[in-house]
Each structure stands twice: as C-alpha cells, then as structure tokens.
Image (cartoon, rainbow, N blue to C red):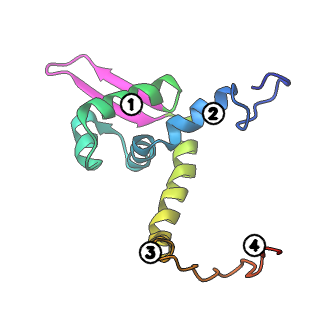
Amino acid sequence: MDESSSSPNVNRRMCPSRLVLEHITSRWGVLVLAALLERSYRFSELRREIDGVSEKMLAQTLQTLERDGFVHRDAKPVIPPRVDYSLTDLGREAAEQVWRLARWTERQVDTVLTAREAYDEGRAPAPQAGTRAGARTIHQ
C-alpha cells in the first residue's frame, strides 16, 4: 500500500507488494516455485533439481516463500527427520504466473542474445514483428 491510498500499488516505494514481487521473481524464487509446480520435494531433492543453488540460498528462499504463504513445509516426526516442501494454493497461482514468464524467456533467449550482440557491436537490432519501426524517431 502507498502513503496516499489504501490500495496496493507496486510502483510506490513503501508498498508491501514490492517485497512480495521481489520474493517470487528472484532468481531462486522463480526456480523453486517452478520446481514445486511438478510435485513436492525434500530439501536435498530440490537442491539437486535446481542446479547451482547453494544450501544457504535454498534454505533462505524456502523460508521466505513459506513466510509469505507460498510454500508449505511439512516436517514429519521420524528418524531421520523428513521435511517435504509443496506449494500452497497461493503458491501454485504465483508459480503458474512466473513459470509462464520463465518459459517465455527460454523461447526468446536467442532473440535476446542476437539483440545483445547487435548492441555490443554498435548495430541497431532489427525491429521485431508487432513493433513500429519508426517509433523512436529523433527530431533535429
């Protein structure tokens, strides 16, 4: 929520929705949510599934997502201890949203890499379908 109204506005500096957005769209947040869309995981399974995440970052991400109500932590009183992580209904909804963005990113990575290369070489990238070629005309 912002200082001047009672409705959330992610563009406002003090709106709590900004922090929620940061949690679910963080590097590891997206990947944890996406993995948990498939099924519930134990910590060690999830760490193997998400290549490159450290134990510390995975623990922090899971704790943050649990605190925000996206992830359910089910600790079973057995020896050795067993903890399973799954999505709550809210978490499933968020995961579906960020997973669509992640899949879109996978599909568009070649286009982005081509644009990056053109930029780095000082060339203007070709306009993409659906964009106006002269949209950035500079008047002298």
Residue that mark 4 sits on: 136
Residue found at the very far left of the displayed protein: 80
Counting other residues with Cα less than 10 Å from the Cα at mark 3, is it few (<14), some (14-19), or many (20 or more)?
A: some
Q: Are marks 2 and 3 in contact (CB under 8 Å)?
A: no
- The tag earlier along the polypeptide, 2 or 3, is 2
Residue identifier under label 3: 117
Q: Position of residue 33 (x, y in %)?
A: 44, 43
Residue 49, numbered circle = none
Is any part of residue 117 visible from this angle?
yes
Tell us which disc is closer to us: 2 or 3.
Answer: 3
Label 1 amino acid? Leu
- Separation of disc 3 and disc 4 at Cα? 20 Å
**Closer-to-camera residue (83/78):** 83
Kindly check if marks 3 and 4 are in contact, taking CB atoms under 8 A apart as contact.
no
Q: Please state which amino acid type lies under the numbered disc 2.
A: Arg
Q: Magenta stretch? A: 71-87
Q: Nearer the viewer, residue 127 or 26?
A: 127
In whole angstroms, how far apart are the C-alphas of marks 2 and 3? 32 Å
**Residue beneath disc 2:** 18
Image-based side of 38 in relation to 76, left or right = right
Specify the quadrant that holds the C terminus: bottom right
The alpha-carbon separation of the residues under discs 4 and 1 comes to 43 Å
- Between the residue at mark 4 and the residue at mark 2, the CA separation in whole angstroms equals 30 Å
Residue 118, relative to residue 62: is it above or below? Answer: below
Q: Amino acid at mark 4?
A: Arg
Residue 83 in the image, given as x and y percentages of width and height: 28, 27
Which residue has dot 1 on it? 62
